[in-house]
Image (spheres, grey):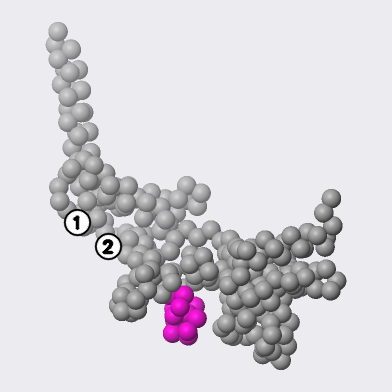
Amino acid sequence: MLTEQRWNAFQKDRLTETEIGKFVLCQAKEDNITRLFIHQFSKWMSAFTKEGWWDTFTICEKSCVKGFYLCQIEEFKIDKNGYLNMVVYPNKFIGEVIDEDAIAWDYLHMTNKFADKYKSQHWRARFNFANLNNIFNERFEASGYSNMENFIFAGFIQGEITLEEISDALEEKYEIEKLAEDINGNLKKYSEKYPLLVKKLPKDESWGMYMTRCTVNYLQDKSYEYDRLKLGNENNILNQVEEVFKYWEEVHKVQKEKKKAEKKLAKSK
């Protein structure tokens, strides 16, 4: 059976192989101290670990002012009492307050530069990568970096790109989301030109109301159907949706007339 000391020694060797050089988020709770506290990339998880009190004992060789730092792991060692310690270098001062749940952290974690134990565990429904790439593409192409994630990370570390800029870019709504919101809020504006689209616009089953997610899915599904039915080369998604419903209206009309003719023929015999 492993004793706590032997387990800590095992952890030291394992983490030394995999985590040296990786980044963690730490907090200095007072000025001019070398004791830091690890923060998770989740307010809930940080609260669970009492903002680092219940996490790995963390120190740095240079004293820090009060606030949050993005730190790089330099060493794991066992102290005189047999406990695991982590030595870090305070690579970047972030500020006295921080949003641990910011979507920017999820993006930065895609670089695989963060310690595995403390990677963001959020499940994000969407990232507007296209918008972020559009905003930073010119600078990225001139940077010499091979991928956008590493370029953004380097810009953040060097103070050229902020967490807020990354989050704002990723959270920007897609054009189809903006269109869906406009349709939901202005049905009369669209009903004259797109009566079938508006008539068949679905409501959320749980809430009984028009919602962006439902309308986006509706528009995309009908656009795919337009292509599948090979109805033409229309590029406007609203025109595509209306054409799909017109197609099915015509199909149903023909089917109805056919059944009517068949009944009439059967009666005449």
Closer-to-camera residue (91/193): 91
Q: Which residue does the numbered mark 2 point to in the structure image? A: 189
Q: Which of the 4 image quadrants contains residue 209? A: bottom left
Q: Residue at x 34, y 66 (%)?
A: 130
Closer-to-camera residue (136/77): 77
Segment tinted magenta in the rendering: 152-166
Q: Position of residue 11 (x, y in %)?
A: 72, 62
Q: Which mark is residue 235?
A: 1
Q: Of the residues under marks 1 and 2, which one precedes in the sequence?
A: 2
Amino acid on which disc 2 is placed: Lys
Q: Which residue is drawn at 43% across and 69% down?
A: 149
Would residue 9 be seen by someone viewing this image from the given angle? yes
SS type, badge 2:
helix
Residue 261 falls inside the magenta stretch? no
Q: How far apart in space, not on screen, are marks 1 and 2 (Cα)? A: 20 Å
Residue 163 falls inside the magenta stretch? yes
Q: Nearer the viewer, mark 1 or mark 2?
A: 1
Would residue 164 be seen by someone viewing this image from the given angle? no
Q: Quadrant of the C terminus?
A: top left
Q: Position of residue 177 (x, y in %)?
A: 36, 62
Residue 201 falls left or right of residue 231 = right
Classify 241 as above or below 163.
Answer: above
